[in-house]
Amino acid sequence: MVPLRQGDLDGMCGVYASLNAAQYLVHAARDLDYLNRLMIHIVGAIYTAKDVTSGGGEVKMASVFEYARSKISKDFKINLSMSNKGRPDRFKTPVDAMAASFELGFPGVFIMGYEGRDSHWTVVRGIVNDKVMLFDSCGQKSFDRRDVIWSKFVTNRLAKSDKVIVAPADLNWVSCGGVA
């Protein structure tokens, strides 16, 4: 028997990824009571019971992020923004796209959805050597850089492998733009 973990019975990883990105970037948002109030509003107002059990895609995750972004802007006067960086035409791998954003030196993280070894949303906080460093709701610490590929390379063989398969629409840079 194996214990259940976040994600086994719920599709809340997009909510956790949005809240984890916010707390990673905004020190004042690291308060558990504050995050709990955000979660209570999100579950019910944005995430329905069906979303909780079946998960939400890019549009639902973006709605959750927008709610958290607007609350943080109002409560702490700090602007967060999210922009898509999924460019398989410019970058050979999702890691190359993320590394290019991190190398600019601006405070930010990625909210990344992936398939393959799992179906999950996570927060990428950096690239260190050959590791993709995570801030993850399921306790994952990192991925090997070579395992992260664009979804355009997915074959039936890869879909059942241990690869981390990222759709371009599921690679989103979240940055802290300063005081509102």
Image (spheres, rainbow, N blue to C red):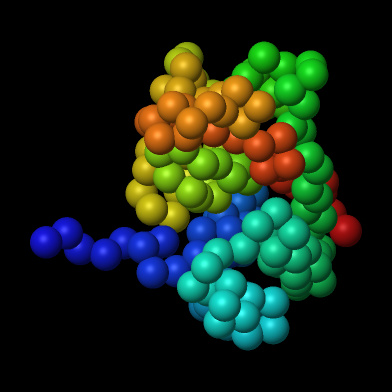
Q: Is residue 72 visible?
A: no
| Residue at the image position 69 percent from the left and 83 percent from the top | 45
Q: Position of residue 38 (x, y in %)?
A: 62, 75
| Residue at the image position 81 percent from the left and 55 percent from the top | 79
| Image quadrant in which the C terminus is located | bottom right
| Residue at the image position 11 percent from the left and 61 percent from the top | 1
Residue at the front extreme, as displayed: 156
Q: Observer-nearest residue: 67 or 43?
A: 43
Q: Where is residue 99 in the image (x, y as percent from the top left)?
A: 64, 21
Compared to residue 135, the image places residue 97 above or below, namely: above
Quarter of the rendering containing residue 91: top right
Compared to residue 18, the image places residue 40 above or below, namely: below
Compared to residue 129, the image places residue 72 above or below, namely: below
| Residue at the image position 62 percent from the left and 80 percent from the top | 48
Quarter of the rendering containing residue 107: top right
Q: Position of residue 141 (x, y in %)?
A: 38, 38
* Number of marks drawn: 0
Compared to residue 97, the image places residue 164 above or below, namely: below
**In the rendered view, does 174 fall on the left or right side of 24?**
right
